[in-house]
Amino acid sequence: MEFHAAIHPFALSGEYPHANSFFASPAHRQGLLTAIKNQIKFERSSDYVVEEKPNKLVAYCKIKRSNFLKDIQEYAAGLDHANLEGIYMGVEQSRFNHLIEIHNNVGIYLPAFFFFPMRIAIKQMALPIFIGSAVKLQTELAEIEKVLNAQQKVKLTITERFEVSDEDVEDYEASYEGSENFWPSFNLLILDHLVKYSLQYKLPIFVFTT
């Protein structure tokens, strides 16, 4: 499976990064935006969610690795002396719930602050969609980085369009063979890159797998 993350407005009119994604449908995105606005208005008396300009894809990552976020999620759970499955099931707590609770790698991060992640149900999806805060995620990543030191361990040149193939994954693993916590560090650098773009442009991060 492949991990994808795309930063763009809900009303993106151009070609979507991957046609098989649930988010590729403008109707699905509009339905989600309406549901999110209703939830936020109920909780915060405001329906502001994101900017809708520029109307383009401003950043995109595609990484050919199954369950891409699990390494950083397990590392974060370990910092809290918790079990990942226990957190998923709600029987254990974590400081890093915006990072961990997107456990199926499908969801949206909004460039706004809210303390707890949300779950939004729409009729087109059997399961609710995870909605996280990019602001809170940035804080969680900064806390993890104090211990992980990913910036020191792994050197990545991450561009606006960043794609990692099967061969690239093998090359990275070979280059950092024996390096402690390579994949959690790699995960953190990717997420930190995405969060910075999201907050800079005030646009959501759409995370999905294919």
Image: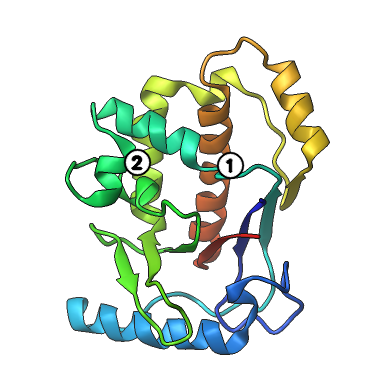
- Seen in the image, is 84 located left or right of residue 124? left
- Seen in the image, is 42 located left or right of residue 161? left
Q: Position of residue 156 (x, y in %)?
A: 68, 31
Name the amino acid type tagged 1.
Answer: Ile
- Seen in the image, is 81 located left or right of residue 111? left
- Seen in the image, is 133 located left or right of residue 60? left
Residues packed near mark 1 inside 10 Å, few (<14), some (14 to 19) or many (20 plus): some
- Asked where in the image residue 179 lies, by quadrant, the reply is top right
| Label 2 sits on residue | 140
- Compare marks 2 and 1 and give the one earlier in the sequence: 2
| Point 69% across, 72% down: residue | 20
Above-or-below relation of 159 to 142 = below
Q: Position of residue 129 (x, y in %)?
A: 41, 70
Q: Nearer the viewer, residue 98 or 78?
A: 78
- Asked where in the image residue 193 lies, by quadrant, the reply is top right
Q: Which mark is residue 190?
A: 1
| Point 30% across, 49% down: residue | 88
Above-or-below relation of 192 to 103 = above
Coloring scheme used: rainbow
Residues packed near mark 2 inside 10 Å, few (<14), some (14 to 19) or many (20 plus): some
Q: Nearer the viewer, residue 122 or 17?
A: 122
Q: Residue furthest top?
A: 178
Q: Secondary structure at mark 2?
A: helix
Q: Secondary structure at mark 1?
A: helix
Q: Position of residue 115 (x, y in %)?
A: 23, 57
Q: Where, quadrant-wise, is the C terminus in this rendering?
A: bottom right
> How far is the residue under mark 2 from the one under mark 1?
14 Å
Q: Which mark is residue 30?
A: none
| Point 40% across, 33% down: residue | 74
Name the amino acid type tagged 2.
Answer: Glu
Q: Position of residue 189 (x, y in %)?
A: 56, 36
